[in-house]
Image (spheres, rainbow, N blue to C red):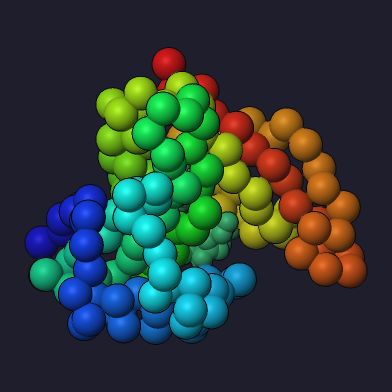
Amino acid sequence: MKAINKVSSLNKSELSKLIDLDKHYFPYPWSLDSWKTLDLNHNSLFLLKFNAEIVGFGLFYAVDGLDTAHLLKICLRPEFRGKGMANTFLFEMLKDISSHGFKEAYLEVNSLNLAAINLYNRNGFQKVHFQKNFYGAGQHALKMVSSLI
Ligand SMILES: CC(C)(COP(=O)(O)OP(=O)(O)OC[C@H]1O[C@@H](n2cnc3c(N)ncnc32)[C@H](O)[C@@H]1OP(=O)(O)O)[C@@H](O)C(=O)NCCC(=O)NCCS
């Protein structure tokens, strides 16, 4: 059974699951230190679970009082992709972010990451900027924004 949980703290086992997912399946993984110092007062972290196991996560930089939330990461384990689960997951996360007063969400994505770009288009994001070599030589980024109102 599928569940989406927003979490305000992480136990040791959840943290190590996330670090593992990020390291193996996210194109730009964080250092151990960045994960260990993650401040969940200023970031919104959502876990996607299947049969109580973490199979994906989404992370927004979202500080109370700001208008804009920044989608930093969304990642699903490969065997759970291509089934529309990310679509539902992102939709539910944006609903939560919007309910906390944020008026828009933005993100950067590698211009070759078609699965992610399609996912974002489907959820109302539009390209507002092309950033050349953002991820390194020849690795360009699209900046995308979605209105939440
Ligand atoms: C990005 C990611 C979360 C998408 O998950 P997913 O389960 O494949 O997404 P969904 O099945 O919900 O599909 C989302 C949309 O992308 C499309 N899509 C999925 N895989 C695709 C692919 N390989 N190529 C092109 N389009 C694809 C789907 O058709 C769907 O579009 P539609 O609703 O218009 O039909 C997943 O690929 C992932 O975890 N990637 C690694 C981490 C990553 O790159 N994150 C984004 C960094 S900015």
Total number of numbered discs in the rendering: 0
Front residue of this view, candidates 130 and 8: 8
Q: Residue at x 18, y 67 (%)?
A: 50
Res 85 quadrant in image: bottom left
Indicate whether 53 appears above or below 125: below
Residue at the top extreme? Answer: 149
> Residue 134 location, x and y as percent?
80, 58
Q: Residue at x 86, y 60 (%)?
A: 133
Q: Residue at x 52, y 54 (%)?
A: 72
Indicate whether 50 appears above or below 100: below
> Residue 122 location, x and y as percent?
49, 36
In the picture, the quarter occupied by the C terminus is top left
Front residue of this view, candidates 30 and 95: 30
Left or right for 131, reference 34:
right
Left or right for 96, reference 128:
left
> Residue 5 location, x and y as percent?
19, 54
> Residue 10 location, x and y as percent?
23, 68
Q: Residue at x 49, y 58 (%)?
A: 73
- Say if residue 72 shows up in the picture: yes
Indicate whether 145 appears above or below 13: above
In the picture, the quarter occupied by the N terminus is bottom left
Front residue of this view, candidates 86 and 29: 29
Left or right for 122, reference 54:
right
Indicate whether 38 appears above or below 145: below
- Say if residue 84 shows up in the picture: no
